[in-house]
Amino acid sequence: MKKLFAFVAVFGMLFIGASVNAFAQDEPQDTTAVEQVAEETPAMAEAEMEAEPVDESEGGELHKQIKIKFVEGGAQFMGAVLLTLILGLAIAIERIIYLNLATTNTDKLLKKIEDALENGGVEAAKDVCRNTRGPVASIFYQGLDRAEEGVEMAEKSIISYGGVQMGLLEKNLSWISLFIAIAPMLGFMGTVIGMIEAFDNIEQAGNVSAGLVAGGIKIALITTVSGLIVAVILQVFYNTILSKIDSLTNQMEDASISLIDMLVKQNLKK
């Protein structure tokens, strides 16, 4: 998982660097008159869009539009928003893979443990748990390890270790929540700074033109839209992970109750 996270992070940094270079190449060369630059920039962008060949596939057209909006929004804040998306997705994908690997067929596991208890006793049941991956098997092992001290002690051990497994299932979720909160904030910050620059251009130009105001506001709002989109994407992944954790938690609780019943029956047979 660490290699996957590092690969995604490096890919994001390379993409940001390429976007910065593209932004630097698209900057106007003549910066002597602020009003002239502000008025010519939308026209230059439209001319470049018309001059570029249109891809036949919709995927190429979408990629081109995203690149144009990224450059218009400014590489500084758009890069920060993109990095937030990459880090958030890396953690979310790692959690989803971990939770999928932690999923266990509890009915099948309980059947194996029941057969092991009847045929080989507690030690045979512990061997079954050792050979099974997942939090349910780990919780069962802790309960079986204390079964000789009584059912009550085994139940306490299951409850205590269940809390440990819950902590492992919820690991790094706070980082996803942080990225969900940060992405819109970065977008709003880019918008506010862009608005300030737009009003500075108006002040230096000495007059208010519709093209100057509309162009500056449009560019400033791109960062806000990008931040909100990133927050929505990460929120979907976050809720998916929470739903998976709730499902695993219910499985652990139900299976633990069944294991305690098996241990009670085992003691009654003795």
Image (cartoon, rainbow, N blue to C red):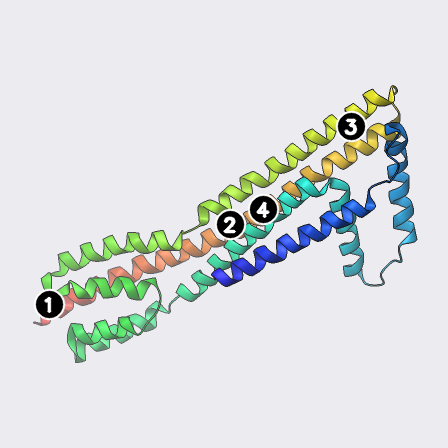
Q: Amino acid at mark 2?
A: Tyr
Numbered badge on residue 198: 3
Disc with the residue nearer the chain's start (4 vs 1): 4
Quadrant in the rendering for residue 150: bottom left
Going by the numbered disc 1, the residue's amino acid type is Asn
Q: Residues within 10 Å of mark 4 (few under 14, many from 20)?
A: many
Find out whether the residues at labels 2 and 1 contact each other: C-beta distance under 8 Å. no
Q: Which residue is mark 4?
A: 84
Query: Mark 3: few, some, or many residues within 10 Å (few <14, many ≥20)?
Result: many
Q: Amino acid at mark 3?
A: Ala
Q: Secondary structure at mark 1?
A: helix
Around disc 2, counting alpha carbons within 10 Å, would you say few (fewer than 14), some (14 to 19), or many (20 or more)?
Answer: many
The quarter of the picture where residue 187 lies is top right
Question: Residue reaching furthest bottom?
Answer: 119
At numbered mark 2, what does the secondary structure look like: helix, strand or loop?
A: helix
Q: Residue at x 91, y 40 (%)?
A: 43
Q: Which residue is mark 1?
A: 267
Query: Residue 207 at what x, y percent from top left?
Result: 88, 20
Would you identify the image quadrant in which residue 10 lies? bottom right
Q: Nearer the viewer, mark 4 or mark 1?
A: 4
Q: Are the residues tagged 3 and 1 within 8 Å (C-beta)?
A: no
Sequence order check: which comes first, mark 3 or mark 1?
3
Disc 2: which residue: 238
Residue projecting furthest to the left: 270
Image quadrant occupied by the C terminus: bottom left
Among numbered discs 2 and 1, the one appearing first in the sequence: 2
Does residue 143 sit above or below 209 in this rendering?
below
Among numbered discs 3 and 2, the one appearing first in the sequence: 3
Which mark identifies residue 96?
none
